[in-house]
Image (tube, coloured by chain):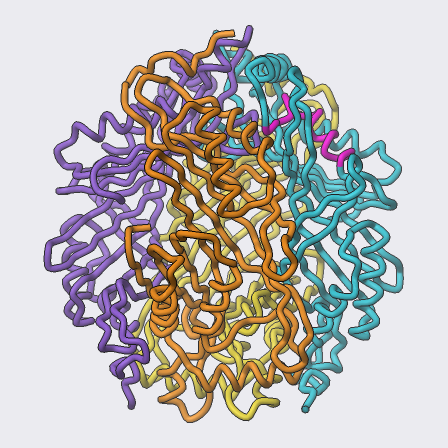
Chain colours: A orange, B yellow, C cyan, D purple
Amino acid sequence: MEDVQNHAPKVAVDIDRVGVRELRLPLLVRDRAQGSQQTVASVDLGVDLPSAFKGTHMSRFVEALKDWSGEISFQSVRGLLQNVKMRLGAQRAYARFSFPYFINKAAPVSGHKSAVSYQCRLTGELDNAGQSFLLEVDVPVMTVCPCSKAISNEGAHSQRALARMSVRMTSFSWLEEFIEIAEEAGSSAVYTLLKRNDEKYVTEHAFARPVFVEDVVRAVAQRLSTRDDVEGFSVEVESMESIHNHNAFARIERGQKI
Amino acid sequence: MEDVQNHAPKVAVDIDRVGVRELRLPLLVRDRAQGSQQTVASVDLGVDLPSAFKGTHMSRFVEALKDWSGEISFQSVRGLLQNVKMRLGAQRAYARFSFPYFINKAAPVSGHKSAVSYQCRLTGELDNAGQSFLLEVDVPVMTVCPCSKAISNEGAHSQRALARMSVRMTSFSWLEEFIEIAEEAGSSAVYTLLKRNDEKYVTEHAFARPVFVEDVVRAVAQRLSTRDDVEGFSVEVESMESIHNHNAFARIERGQKI
Amino acid sequence: MEDVQNHAPKVAVDIDRVGVRELRLPLLVRDRAQGSQQTVASVDLGVDLPSAFKGTHMSRFVEALKDWSGEISFQSVRGLLQNVKMRLGAQRAYARFSFPYFINKAAPVSGHKSAVSYQCRLTGELDNAGQSFLLEVDVPVMTVCPCSKAISNEGAHSQRALARMSVRMTSFSWLEEFIEIAEEAGSSAVYTLLKRNDEKYVTEHAFARPVFVEDVVRAVAQRLSTRDDVEGFSVEVESMESIHNHNAFARIERGQKI
Amino acid sequence: MEDVQNHAPKVAVDIDRVGVRELRLPLLVRDRAQGSQQTVASVDLGVDLPSAFKGTHMSRFVEALKDWSGEISFQSVRGLLQNVKMRLGAQRAYARFSFPYFINKAAPVSGHKSAVSYQCRLTGELDNAGQSFLLEVDVPVMTVCPCSKAISNEGAHSQRALARMSVRMTSFSWLEEFIEIAEEAGSSAVYTLLKRNDEKYVTEHAFARPVFVEDVVRAVAQRLSTRDDVEGFSVEVESMESIHNHNAFARIERGQKI
């Protein structure tokens, strides 16, 4: 049968990236506490396409995924990218996995454990110059407003905020370490299971540490700046303000644009 | 040209509703303060289809919309539904408009005005038994947790919550009246523009009126129950708990299922 | 510490349903081919709340989930609902799980296998009258337009459509059976991995079976009507029309309102 | 009252951008056919924040918006950004408006007109080096697969695809010009209202011009490359493949990273 993809295109322009997107599949992720955990990912895969070819061969991305172990790590993504490059005859390969990651977290007083989910993305890119590896994680935290607290006779508005980290890594590190950095920067971490004594603790703990989104983004940026395994990063904190119907956000970028 | 839609179908079954969905268009909505306001809607239109016909004629829905005034009201939706019924030769016609509605709201102390947006849906259905008209509006409010406040030495967690009302109307009423019912049931309304003295007032006002989602849903249900223009309703309140990564919700339904 | 939830509410109205929503957790689902499969769910849990109590105890929902096996089935949901009723002192309990389900499907000519994902929801409700069990699954299919094919000298527009089934079950049945019903009603099933000879087959197979959304919804409804394990259902088919920026849909409901 | 925002922060780090997000408001947009059109936008506003200040003053963003005309254009965004910079005492200001834009498009044979909506984003950034202006528009088109057509005895799969352009402008140009570029690059434009003779034309026209996402992205990139008002751009085309449950995409970037 005719291979239309191998024809010359009408417009001879190099394509930066071409591939498949939002392909869902089960995924195994490395987990500090248990070795590994089973989750579900949405995957994007892509390659460059030189100006000489009309189209890429989309089914080969799926074949490369089938060959692959399905356990994601800094190392295993390299293997996937090499396979994609080879199967597609490409100079550059790209893979992005988006998935929820679960941590079994103990409540602060009762110690009762329950799973909290964090949305993560791992992105690898491989070309002749080497491999880059981007780790992204969205961490929900609680923020208590310092201004509202300072000016009010009682109380202060609080809300759920999301700290989104994008970190360009030079080696493997646990997702848990980045989640802890964000949780320590908020007024409090969030939990799935809180008994009455836990709720008392979380409330008092949070009101003793009021923070703006600006405070959270700075604290996370400072911690990331000191890590040897981090080449560059962006951090964005967005709070669903309880006194508004819009959000507040703050963003810091360091190193190469992400 | 062949009219395939008029053929007999392979499976002779009546279809309850068939039509178009997520058609976006500019829309004029009646507004208590200004007479009318311009917004943008996503529209669904549908009719029944008897077992004798293979398909409906989708382009006629768009033609009925073009004929229509574009100013939505209890009365004008009736005109649209009659036109849809006639053009499509249907027994039942259905229309649903989803749009943001803006209210210019004054801050509680400074009096500074700014627009707050509320997501609304208006749904009309017309058959031989008459017309039904469903008004839906999602109202963001602030909730301060009564449990957290009672057990903690200082503070209480608060968050943005959404009160979603679905109200089966017997006559025209202003959207503003339903929005006020929900805002009065929360610990506080939310605002777009709050100066420092407003933020102090909102914080103190909210902490003096802590409510669970259960309290909000009950207060709204009670107010809706006493209205003569309301035939039946459902209310659902969902809060984005600031101490959790999941939400709390409560729901009350009265009258025929909505 | 004070149990504010047990206080009398200001407004003494029964609440139909109160609970937690969008709680994410890992989930094991029964799988016809492999016994079971691991996936990830978003969970809602709720109970009724009598007018005598100000609030429910939200943390007990999470405790009931922790007690639970985590393998979902008609039977195991009953156990969860009984535990929720008991822990919360409720008359009615409700649970809803939303998750992607994977089937390893063979391409029609090459036989190459790859995972296709289907978004599913399982909802159980238990009260003194008994348990109801609702199975929902969204099945992507391809539709080729019969009108476009009949009137054009060449071709016909096709598109991805989604068949959404909500089925009230009387006993356990495999998800796979309902997925097959929808796939057989479209012009073709969709696949994750198609080699060139498969793509030729799928194209020709689909063009030999052009269908409107009306044809798909009727074929699915007819098949569901004949099943002994189905008490009532709704089916909705929505196609992302390739010639429009809006969608076409058709819907059939049978039995009690879902 | 205390101005907590003016305090020194605990962590003295410059913040790249801080502000408000997802603020909804009515918006007037310049329109080639009618002078202007009324729509509804979601707005983000931000500024830099030096390391000396704990927080920005969020209410001033809303005040700057209130001052502003509400008619968006290359020129008027400059005025808004200058006001934001001044009110906030900032070195850099940023504004982003996301809104649907409507074009009244004639069907290709019948000439019947109907509104098609296009999601647009306009982003301005102003600092001491000058102002940048980014125009983004998502254009739905139809694609007929050249491979499927070449290898099949009959038909070819087609689908709705989205061409997303991000264009860094040096001067004002009409949104309509960029929409036309994308529509001409697909197998066919999409329409809201098509009568039978229009549908025949669109089908035959599209089947005479089969294109991959690669063909569309190249054709758009070539056209953008020749424009004097374009400093740099990215184009991404994503098709909701009708034979798969995942999408295909292709992307070209030129000039500075966007």
Q: Position of residue D207 (x, y in %)?
A: 43, 14
Split into 4 quadrants, where in the image is the C terminus of chain B?
bottom right
Residue at screen point 55% across, 71% down: A190
- State which quadrant residue A156 falls in: bottom left
Residue at 42% x, 25% y is D142
**Image side of residue B8 versus residue D143, left or right:** right
- Please tell me whether residue B49 belongs to the stretch shown in magenta: no
Q: Which residues are magenta?
A: C176-192
Q: In screen coordinates, is B163 left or right of A38?
A: left
- D146 in relation to B118, above or below: above
Residue at 61% x, 74% y is: B213
Residue C127 visible somewhere in the drawing: yes
Q: Is residue C178 magenta?
A: yes
Q: Quadrant of residue D233?
A: top left
Say which residue appears at 51% left-offset and 62% top-offset. Answer: B138
How far across and down, in percent of the image, does residue C126 sit?
83, 60
Q: Position of residue B139 (x, y in %)?
A: 50, 66
